[in-house]
Image (cartoon, rainbow, N blue to C red):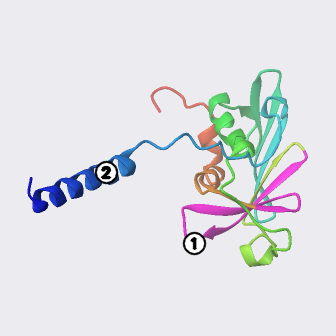
């Protein structure tokens, strides 16, 4: 075997090894921590405010959800469950305790969701990823912007639709 063949064979083996490492499936990452430790099955009231104005309110009665504001009507439980998912949103990043709320648009949150007594304030859009700054108690976190979009749905989205409408 000539020296050039030996070098080419070693280079091919090296490239194959690099390709195997590159395409090797990564192990499962640990799950991200939830935004709150709320037991969503125990939540009995939900309020959604934009600015300081109440937009929607829901109350659980037994196993059913009812909208109490702006309409008084039974709500679609599956859709309210999606709103409850905000409380369990995976946190992408926790910010230091000394981070100022004003810097992230949380001094006056654009939207606030309240689950019983726990308030979650939504601030500015995080510029480097599709995410949103949120404040829970005294903590500031970054979560997927999808959860903010759930708060922007109109109240009619949570009401049952009539056939033929």
Q: Disc 2 designates what residue? A: 19
Q: Dot 2: within a 10 Å radius of its alpha carbon, few (fewer than 14), some, or many (20 or more) residues?
A: few
Which residue reaches farthest bottom? 103
- Tell me where the magenta segment starts and ends, as one range: 117-140
Residue 91 x/y as whole percent: 69, 52
Q: Position of residue 140 (x, y in %)?
A: 78, 63
Q: Secondary structure at mark 1?
A: loop
Q: Which disc, if any, is residue 83?
A: none
97 relative to 94 in the view: left or right: right
Vertical placement of 109 versus 8: above or below? below
Name the residue rendered at 59%, 41% in the picture.
157
What's the magenta bit mostly, secondary-structure-wise? Answer: strand
Q: Is residue 163 left or right of residue 160?
A: left
- Residue 127 is marked as 1
Q: Could you say where residue 116 lies in the image, as x and y percent from the top left?
A: 88, 42
Q: Nearer the viewer, residue 5 or 109?
A: 5
Q: Nearer the viewer, residue 112 or 70?
A: 112
Q: In the rendered view, would you say 114 is above or below 38? A: below
Total labels drawn: 2
* Few, some or many residues within 10 Å of mark 1 (<14, 14–19, 20+): few
């Amino acid at each position: 075997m000539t020296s050039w063949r030996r070098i080419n064979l070693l280079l091919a083996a090296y490239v194959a090894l690099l390709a195997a490492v590159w395409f090797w499936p990564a192990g499962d990452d640990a799950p991200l921590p939830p935004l709150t430790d709320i037991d969503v099955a125990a939540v009995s009231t939900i309020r959604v405010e934009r600015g300081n104005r109440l937009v929607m309110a829901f109350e659980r009665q037994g196993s059913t959800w009812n909208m109490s504001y702006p309409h008084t009507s039974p709500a679609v439980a599956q859709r309210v469950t999606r709103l409850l998912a905000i409380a369990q949103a995976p946190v992408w990043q926790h910010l230091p305790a000394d981070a100022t709320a004003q810097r992230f648009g949380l001094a006056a949150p654009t939207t606030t969701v309240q689950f019983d007594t726990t308030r979650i304030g939504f601030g500015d859009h995080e510029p480097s990823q599709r995410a949103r700054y949120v404040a829970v108690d005294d903590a500031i976190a970054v979560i997927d912007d999808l959860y903010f979009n759930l708060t922007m749905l109109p109240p009619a989205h949570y009401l049952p639709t009539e056939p033929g409408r």
